Amino acid sequence: FQAGKTEAFEEIYARHARRMMSYLISMLEDRQLSEDVLQEVFTHFAQGAARLNHETNVAAYLFRSARNGAVSALRNRNRIMQVVASEALVFERQRSDLPAAYANLESQELRTRLNAALFKLSEAEREVVMLRTQGELTFQEIAEITQNPLSTVATRYENGIKRLKGFLGHE
């Protein structure tokens, strides 16, 4: 991708765009704005790829750019940054011990309850839970994106999941 090969860029886009879009929608609650931010992220990535270190974690770089773009978009709309679950919220079964029923949120009532529960989390917990579940990122990648220690990220995720289970009545 650093050499400007179109095929490499297309592969990176195919690998990350869907997850990034889901993450952006969950942050911005606006599909059109999310599409705009996603386009800006990939445009800047394509223009600056040659300047990136060959050891750069592309997923972490893209998600950090998406996060920064979303925060800027929210500021431009004069809103406080909030993270909410998108309709396609899928918890990663291996990292989460929430019941499998939450993996395919079929019920609008359940989505509404989950959204309300996510709002009860601290902003830091919500962000880590969303990056992990929506972005499907590793704790290491989340630590790089949020610029927090790995142990802090893992604790925030664990606490967030425990609190969500409590809010949803699944102790």
Image: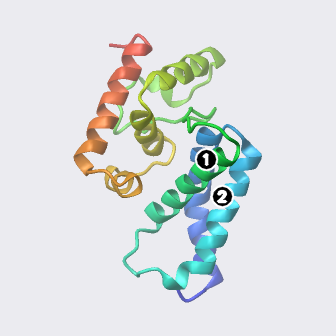
Q: Residue 21's x, y, as percent? A: 63, 50
Q: Residue at x 36, y 58 (%)?
A: 144
For label 2, the residue is 38
Question: Residue 24 shows which numbered tag?
Answer: 1
Residue type beneath disc 1: Leu
The reply to whether residue 97 is visible in this rendering is: no
Q: Label 1 crowding class (10 Å Cα cut-off): few <14, some 14-19, many 20+?
A: many
The reply to whether the C-beta atoms of the residues labelled 2 and 1 are less than 8 Å apart is: yes
Q: Residue furthest left?
A: 151
Q: Quadrant of residue 14?
A: bottom right
Task: Give the position of the N terminus as an image quadrant.
Answer: bottom right
Left or right: 117, with 47 as reference point:
left
Picture coordinates of residue 41, whole percent (x, y): 62, 64
Colouring rule applied to residues: rainbow
Residue 135 tag number: none
The percent coordinates of residue 126 (x first, y second) are 45, 34
Q: Is residue 20 visible?
A: yes
Q: Is residue 85 above or below residue 115?
A: below
